Image: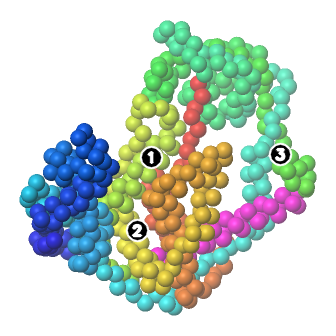
Amino acid sequence: MQVKELKQSGLNHELEITVTAQDIDKQVDKRLQEVGKTMKMPGFRPGKVPLNILKKKYGKAIMGEVLEITVNETSAKALQDKNLRPAIQPKIEVKSFDDGKDLTYTMSVEVLPKVEVKEFKGLKLQKLTAKPGDKEVNESLEKIAANNQSTVKVEGTRAAKDGDTTVIDFKGRTADDNFEHPGMAGEGHHLKLGSGMFIPGFEEQMIGKKAGDKIEVKVTFPEKYAKDLAGRDAIFDVTIQELREPGEAKMDDDFAKSLGLDNIDALKKAVSEQMQQEYDRHSQMYLKKSLMDRLDELHNFEIPAGMHDLEFNNILQQIEHERAHSDPNHVHDGDHDHTGRVSEEEKDELKDIAGRRVRLGLVLSEIGNANNIKVSDIELQKAVIAEAQRYPGQERDVFDYFSKNRNALETLRAPLFEQKVVDYILELADVSEKTVSGEELLKALDEDEGEEKSAKSSEKSGDKKPAAKKKKA
């Protein structure tokens, strides 16, 4: 094997590798002999077919096998001999290969940079901590009560208003053909006016109506709706069976018991503990972000363009997917655009985020490898179990998927490794604590937003919109 470096620019190398025809023939003959041991041909005993006949019959197929094996083996050896560590899969281009001729191919490879890790022991970092106060706990309790608020029947003949719940029977049809499509009818349905759960214009036409009224509601389905209804006019015959209004929210023992707790004190304690867990999580996020910022400040080196492009595309696809699925008119079918558009200005920001991620990933990898930090099989197994628990009833499928897909398993190993390296650095860092209010903690985290939150955010303001439910007819 002969290796010649054609060119080298930054992290990019191009090598030309030549394997002699003699070496190729040896590999072909060796493979043919292996095949011939079990080959049956008329006129010959098993394993006694002459090599020249085997070559004539199977030579082309064997040449293909030998090509693949030879390229894999020689390219790996060339990289090892040159001490090159590929950042991504090298690109191979065969220049010449034929019976009786040398194999010549080029390999374009982008290598990992040499990362000189700066001193990280004793890094000065600040950890913000918070504890929920009585006011915050009570506000949280009020929200819980509002979300679990019951309704009471409105007595008399009061007209419906925003915030009321109407109990309705409805039957709909498309206006142009009077066809009753599936999902356009229901009985005894509780519809809260102003909730936006039905298509635009439906709830507004219920305002001012009374229990017992029979009305005709005319609406137009949104353009991004199910393909057989999108953009079409529809008519719903609606009967208001009952009108209900929010009942009084009582924060007492009975309310706590309705949520599965013994009394109101137990509910307050549970809420306080849950809030504390959230504060602790945000506190760790802020500390990790501060550490990442310091490491980013300390290290500045060229990163592989291929790794940067892969990371950028992953971030972009995730944001487009989240934006599409946060659209309140999003429909889960295969006949519409499933992407949420990202502006060119936003793409520039995402490229910076991708570059930061790749650079910090290389730094953490270098620190982890230098200090023999590894993810144990037990830790990885726990991660697989945790992933399987996210899919009740499909646990076996999840286990089989990870056992057969090494790349998928690595997606679980990577974040575990990163967190172990971060924990290692934090143990050696000089971390001071500052107690702040919960509001101040969340504000600090929002203002100094980490790249992970930025990448996942689907709004310029940084607010993450929850995925909306599919609207009913």
Quadrant of the frame with the C terminus: top right
Circle 1 residues within 10 Å: few <14, some 14–19, many ≥20? some
From the image, give the main secondary structure of the stretch colored magenta.
helix
Q: Please report the bounds of the magenta region as a residue range.
A: 264-293
Question: Residue 392's mark?
Answer: none
Is residue 344 found left or right of 269 in the rendered image?
left
Q: Nearer the viewer, residue 413 or 206?
A: 413
Which amino acid type is marked by label 2? Arg
What x and y, as percent, mark residue 337?
Answer: 39, 36
Above or below: residue 338 compared with residue 372: above
Q: Secondary structure at mark 3?
A: loop
Query: Is residue 116 or residue 155 the one in the foreground?
Result: 116
Does the stretch in magenta take in 9? Answer: no
Calculate the distance from the C-alpha at mark 1 to the C-alpha at mark 3. 38 Å
**Can you see residue 406?**
yes
Q: Residue at x 65, y 53 (%)?
A: 389
* Side (left or right) of 257 relative to 467: right
Amino acid type, label 3? Ala
413 or 471: which is nearer to us?
Answer: 413
Foreground: disc 1 or disc 3 = 1
Gap between marks 2 and 3 measured at Cα: 47 Å
Nearer mark to the viewer, of 2 and 3:
2
Q: Which comes before the other along the chain, label 2 or label 3?
A: 3
Disc 3 target residue? 249
Give the residue at x 72% y 72%. Answer: 131
Say left or right for 129 vs 326.
Answer: right
Which label was assigned to residue 357? 2
Q: Secondary structure at mark 1?
A: helix
Residue type marked 1: His
**Pointer 1 residue:** 321
